[in-house]
Image: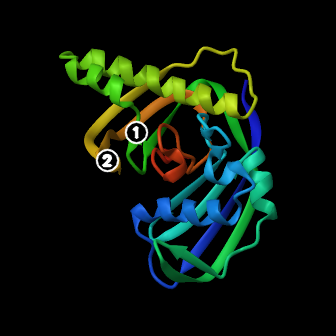
Amino acid sequence: MNSQVERTTLTLCCARPLQDHEATQLRGFFGGRYRNRPEFHHHGQAGLIYRHPLVQYKTIGGVGRVAGIGAGSFLLQAVDSPRTLTLNGETVEVLDTHRHTEVVAFGPVEGDIEYRFLTPWLALNEENYQTYKQMRLKTQRSELLNRVLVGNLLSLCKSLDIEVTDRLRAEVSVDGTEEVKIKQDVSLLGVRGTFRVNFTIPEMWGIGKQSARGFGTVHRIGG
C-alpha cells in the first residue's frame, strides 16, 4: 500500500556554517515566530504535544533546513523566508533561501528498502534504555530496536492520518552508539547505522525521539 505525501523543504544558506546542535535554536526561532501554530514548536495549551512532528529542523553540512510533510508542508509554503536568524542570541544573516514542494512516495511496500541514519537515531527512552542495557544477547537488543523502529513509522503514519494494514518488518544494523545530551541531566542513547524496512520514508526525514531537532534523519541507500 504505497501512497504519497506532500513535502516542502525550506533551505537556508547563512553567512556562516550552522553547527549540528543549532537545529534546536532553529526550531526555537521558527517556533517563536509562529507561536500560534503548534506544528512549528510542538507545544499546546496542556504542554508538549506527544506525536510525530510534521515540521522538522535540521543543520546538515552547515546548511539549515526546515522540512514539513502533510499539514506541515502546507504551513511551510505560507511562511516568509527570513533574512536573518536569531540563534541563541546571535543574529545570523541568511544569504540565500530555496523553497521546494513536491509529492513523494510514502508508506508500506512489498520489498525491503535500505536506509542510513545521517544523524543519531534516539530510539530508546530512559526506561527501555535500561531494559536494553540489561539484555546480554545481541539478538535481544536487535529485536528491541527493530520493534521500536516499526513503532516510529506507525507513529508517523498516525500523525498523517494514514491507516497501515500491512505488517511492517524492520532490521536494524548498528554501527555504533553514543550518549546524546538533550537537556540538562538527560541523555539518550544515539544509534548510528543502517536499517532495512518494507516502507518508503521521505528522503532526509527524521524518525524517533527528538526528530523535530534533526535526530534520526534518514538517507535511502541505492536510490
Q: Amino acid at mark 2?
A: Val
Q: Residue at x 34, y 31 (%)?
A: 173
One can see residue 25 in this view: yes
Q: x, y (%) of residue 125? A: 39, 31
**Residue farthest to the front, as pictured:** 46
Is residue 150 placed above or below 41 in the rendered structure? above
Lateral position of residue 53 relative to residue 36, left or right: left
Residue 221: % across, % down: 48, 44
The residue most toward the left is 136
Q: Nearer the viewer, residue 132 or 35?
A: 35
Q: Secondary structure at mark 1?
A: strand
Q: Residue at x 67, y 43 (%)?
A: 44
- The residue lying at 51 percent from left, 70 percent from top is 63
> Camera-side residue: 164 or 50?
50
Instruction: Please identify the quarter of the rendering in which residue 148 is found.
Output: top left
Comes first in the chain, label 2 or label 1: 1
Q: Residues within 10 Å of mark 1 (few under 14, many from 20)?
A: many
Q: Secondary structure at mark 2?
A: strand
Residue under the point 23% across and 20% down: 138
Q: Is residue 219 visible?
A: no
Structural distance between the alpha carbons of marks 2 and 1? 8 Å
Q: Amino acid at mark 1?
A: Leu
Decide if residue 113 is on the left or right side of residue 18: right
Q: Is residue 15 above or below residue 164?
A: below
Which numbered disc covers residue 122? 1
Question: Does residue 211 lie above or below 135 as drawn?
Answer: below
Q: Position of residue 109 (x, y in %)?
A: 64, 26
- Given residues 189 and 87, the one toward you in this image is 87
Q: Are marks 2 and 1 in contact (CB under 8 Å)?
A: yes
| Residue, disc 2 | 180
